[in-house]
Image (tube, helix red, strand yellow):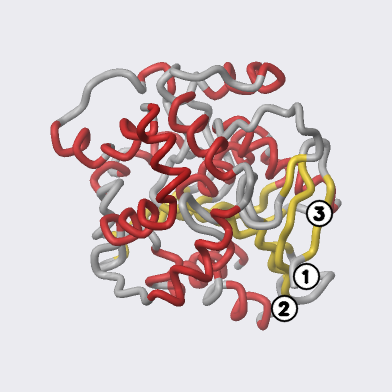
């Protein structure tokens, strides 16, 4: 059973385990996935006495916008603001944040701009804040090839395809991004239900268009986007986990991410694991969180 909390923008659904008075640990899922990313991470942390919170991002599962007029934005500023607002709505003391992909972006932004809310950060794949001013610059062919899904979602055909074939599309990405993970149909379907959220498609499409300046952002978030454009440093203690077999962001892409972290930084390459690292090697995530709590 999920709980809900209202922020200025959303009614955020979340799972909670552990002691109500324990140090909070917030686990943020990626795209296209959901709270099941942390099924094997949350229980041992809760059993150790911590308060473990796992929210559904905007556009996923039971999370809903409060106002029909709010732009269905998936831009990075929205993700960071949502996590900040979630922490504030629950009145949490400084928390450990852990996340990857979209969730990792939210964690990095919150740690960069509101470090007083963050005790430590486990950032899967490293510095997850997008460099939007440089997003339009060409890269090496193998990088461009891996981003095919982003180009697809920047077309009308891609928008229609995500509406009609969202499960097929997302299942393919799971296979490509975590080539050593042999997930079954039941595992995928348990998460794919979250893609039936009425805002999933629009939030997704806006995200992948906004990062290339092909879609406008939420006007209320533009000041935050302007601050993100300078690639802010992160001053909280951080452990970067990167799967050696990540099919969308190879581990060499975070080789130099340490320059963005000023509060203590350690990088760990996890053998065999791909993009969905918390599902494939949950023990590595649990250990990183516990190391930050020492």
User: In which quadrant of the rendered view does residue 211 lie?
Assistant: top left
**Tags 3 and 2 in contact by the CB under 8 Å rule?**
no
**Residue for badge 2:** 49
**Tags 2 and 1 in contact by the CB under 8 Å rule?**
yes
Mark 1, other Cα within 10 Å: few <14 / some 14–19 / many ≥20: some
- CA separation in Å, label 2 and label 1: 6 Å
Q: Nearer the viewer, residue 36 or 69?
A: 69
Q: Is residue 231 left or right of residue 71?
A: left
| In the rendered image, the vertical position of residue 39 relative to residue 222, given as above or below | below
**Residue for badge 3:** 92
**Badge number at residue 22:** 1
Residue 269 in view in this figure: no
User: What residue appears at the point 36 percent right and 19 percent down from the top-left corner?
Assistant: 134
Q: Position of residue 52 (x, y in %)?
A: 69, 68
Find numbered disc 3 in the image and state the secondary structure of the residue it sits on: loop
Residue 72 in view in this figure: yes
| In the rendered image, the vertical position of residue 29 relative to residue 134, given as above or below | below
| In the rendered image, the vertical position of residue 157 relative to residue 267, given as above or below | above
Mark 3 or mark 2: name the one nearer the start of the chain: 2
């Amino acid at each position: 059973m999920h709980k809900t909390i209202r922020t200025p923008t959303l009614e955020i659904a979340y799972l909670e385990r552990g002691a109500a008075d324990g140090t909070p640990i917030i686990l943020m899922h990626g795209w296209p996935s959901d709270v099941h990313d942390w099924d094997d991470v949350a229980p041992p942390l809760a059993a150790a006495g911590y308060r473990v919170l796992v929210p559904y991002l905007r556009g996923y599962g039971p999370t809903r916008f409060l106002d029909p007029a709010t732009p269905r934005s998936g831009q990075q500023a929205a993700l960071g603001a949502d996590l900040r607002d979630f922490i504030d709505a629950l009145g949490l003391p400084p928390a450990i944040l852990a996340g990857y992909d979209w969730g990792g972006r939210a964690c990095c932004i919150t740690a960069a701009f509101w470090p007083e809310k963050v005790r430590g950060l486990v950032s899967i794949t490293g510095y997850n804040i997008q460099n939007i001013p440089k997003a339009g610059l060409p890269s090496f062919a193998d990088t461009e090839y891996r981003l095919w899904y982003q180009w697809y979602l920047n077309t009308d055909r891609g928008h229609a395809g995500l509406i009609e074939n969202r499960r097929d599309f997302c299942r393919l990405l799971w296979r490509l991004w975590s080539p050593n993970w042999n997930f079954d149909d039941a595992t995928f379907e348990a998460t794919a239900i979250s893609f039936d959220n009425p805002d999933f498609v629009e939030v997704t499409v806006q995200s992948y268009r906004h990062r290339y300046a092909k879609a406008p952002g939420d006007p209320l978030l533009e000041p935050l986007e302007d601050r993100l454009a300078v690639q802010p440093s992160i001053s909280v203690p951080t452990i970067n986990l990167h799967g050696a077999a990540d099919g969308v962001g190879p581990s060499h892409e975070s080789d130099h991410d340490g320059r963005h972290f000023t509060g203590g930084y350690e990088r760990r390459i996890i053998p065999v694991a791909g993009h969905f690292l918390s599902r494939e090697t949950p023990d590595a995530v649990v250990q990183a969180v516990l190391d930050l709590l020492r």
